[in-house]
């Protein structure tokens, strides 16, 4: 069986996804799971 050929595509995060990502990064930095340097990257 032949696999379906995928094409490269760009996907951008929605405003809601960006907000949730930012909140998750802030929470990880506050609990010292990541450094402030990593957060800024």
Image (cartoon, rainbow, N blue to C red):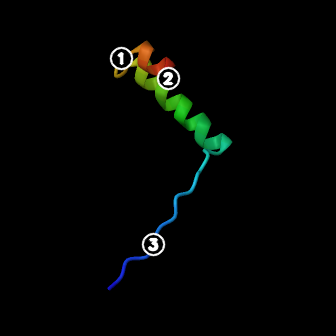
Q: CA distance from mark 2 to mark 3?
A: 38 Å
Q: Secondary structure at mark 1?
A: loop
Mark 1 is surrounded, within 10 Å at the Cα level, by few (under 14), some (14 to 19) or many (20 or more) other residues, namely few
Mark 2 is surrounded, within 10 Å at the Cα level, by few (under 14), some (14 to 19) or many (20 or more) other residues, namely some
Badge 2 vs badge 1, beta-carbon distance below 8 Å = no
The quadrant in which the N terminus is found is bottom left
**Image disc number at residue 26:** 2
Q: CA distance from mark 1 to mark 3?
A: 42 Å
Q: Position of residue 2 (x, y in %)?
A: 36, 82
How many marks can you see? 3
Extreme top residue here?
36
Up-down relation of residue 18 to residue 27 (above or below): below
Pointer 1 residue: 32
Badge 2 vs badge 3, beta-carbon distance below 8 Å = no
Extreme bottom residue here?
1
Q: Position of residue 6 (x, y in %)?
A: 47, 67
Residue at image coords 41%, 24%: 28
Which mark sits nearer the N-terminus, 1 or 3? 3
Residue at image coords 58%, 51%: 10
Q: Secondary structure at mark 2?
A: helix
**Closer to us: mark 1 or mark 3?**
3
Q: In the rendered image, which quarter is residue 3 located in?
A: bottom left
Residue at image coords 60%, 37%: 18
Up-down relation of residue 3 to residue 24 (above or below): below
Q: In the rendered image, which quarter is residue 13 located in?
A: top right
Residue toward you, 13 or 32: 13
Q: Position of residue 15 (x, y in %)?
A: 67, 41
Q: CA distance from mark 2 to mark 1?
A: 10 Å
**Image disc number at residue 5:** 3
Residue toward you, 38 or 7: 7
Q: Secondary structure at mark 3?
A: loop
Residue toward you, 35 or 41: 41
């Amino acid at each position: 069986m032949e696999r379906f050929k995928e094409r490269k595509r760009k996907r951008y995060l929605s405003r809601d996804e960006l907000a949730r990502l930012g909140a998750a990064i802030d929470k990880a930095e506050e609990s010292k799971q990541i450094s402030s340097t990593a957060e800024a990257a």
